[in-house]
Image (tube, rainbow, N blue to C red):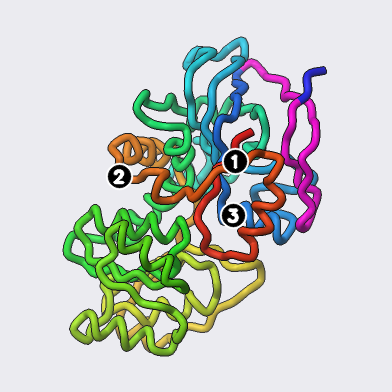
Amino acid sequence: MRTMLAAVLYGKEDLRIEPVAVPQLGPGDILVRVRVALTCGTDVKVFRRGYHARMIVPPALFGHELAGDVVEVGSSVTRFTVGQRVVAANSAPCGTCFYCQRGLENLCDDLLFNNGAYAEYIRIPARIVEKNTHEIPDHVSYEDAALVEPLACVLRGFEETGVRPGDTVAVIGLGPIGLMFVRLAHVHGARVIAIGRRPSQLERAARLGADELLLTDEPSKLQAAVRSLTGGRGADAAVEAVGQPEAWETAVHLVRRGGTVNFFGGCPANTTVRLDTGLLHYSEITCKASFHHTPAHIRKALDTIARGIITARDFVSGTEPLSNLLEVMRYLMSHNGHMKTAIIP
């Protein structure tokens, strides 16, 4: 039996790097040698909580943002050959259920998730091979390509928010996800108000195109600050990229009448928010939540990266070997909003 080193999540903050069997392939699967696996805020949440209701149930292989090389293909695979550089998403929809038939593949009744990026090799299941795996263009690095999955989620959220050129967009939370929203809004001709917890986050946001920078050390003053920057009206749209109920509640107060709020950050399980019904009703505020991605957005994300709009140098702060993953996760858990680390198996 061939073995490889992989990260296995056993429970809350219980992550071990240990030998496991190299995955066996079915007819439609491919085996990818992982060249880069990126850390993710979702992985940090899973590490802290010990599970994810939809994505992973321990004990399980861990990690989902990756790029690498095809080293083996199943007997029925025709789209890929050994030696190709590929990026694979962490899921694929069934294509036939109620939601898939209505263009909501992210809500698929049988959404197939795949984990195991923090390893020397990963098996890409046939459905993901067919629907959500792509060859990496020659000029795109592995690190850049590995950003496809999170960027696809952000692209979908951005489209759902309906931002138009000339709009003012307030982005709350300046981790990698929030900064991707900042970049996309800037590229699409919007004025961006970036709201973060640390000066270093605001500096990154400015480099990516933010026009106005606000610290969240006094949340009660944010509404007045945003209104002062928008002629007293409020932002046309606000994106919550923190994943905390208090930030959801704050976001609603930052938009103008007729504005849109996207609750993008996933909050802890069983949490609730209190919203001013009069404000929502009489100001006609649209509240949306965006979850995950679709195959179309995976393709759009790879194209966006290939055009150089999103690059790893803006979102990846360093590299570490697989053997250091536990220390990296502990660090990220205590440094919320930190940039991504590239794990090199």
Q: At 28% from the left edge and 37% from the top edge, which residue is drawn? A: 307
- When the figure is inspected, residue 117 is found, relative to residue 231, above or below; the finding is above
Q: Which circle's residue, 2 or 3, is located before the other in the chain? A: 3
Residue closer to the observer: 215 or 190:
215
Q: Residue 294, position in %: x, y? A: 45, 43
Q: CA distance from mark 1 to mark 3?
A: 16 Å
Label 1 or label 2, whichever lies nearer to me, is 1
Q: Residue 177, position in %: x, y? A: 45, 57
Residue assigned mark 3: 42
Residue assigned mark 2: 309
Residue closer to the observer: 158 or 277:
158
Q: Helix, strand or loop at disc 2?
A: loop
| Position of residue 197 in the picture relative to residue 109 (left or right) | left
The rendered magenta stretch, by its main secondary structure, is classed as strand
Residue closer to the observer: 49 or 17:
17
| Position of residue 203 in the picture relative to residue 129 (left or right) | left
Label 1 or label 3, whichever lies nearer to me, is 1
- When the figure is inspected, residue 163 is found, relative to residue 229, above or below; the finding is above
Residue assigned mark 1: 343
Q: Does the magenta portion include 242?
A: no
Q: CA distance from mark 2 to mark 3?
A: 23 Å
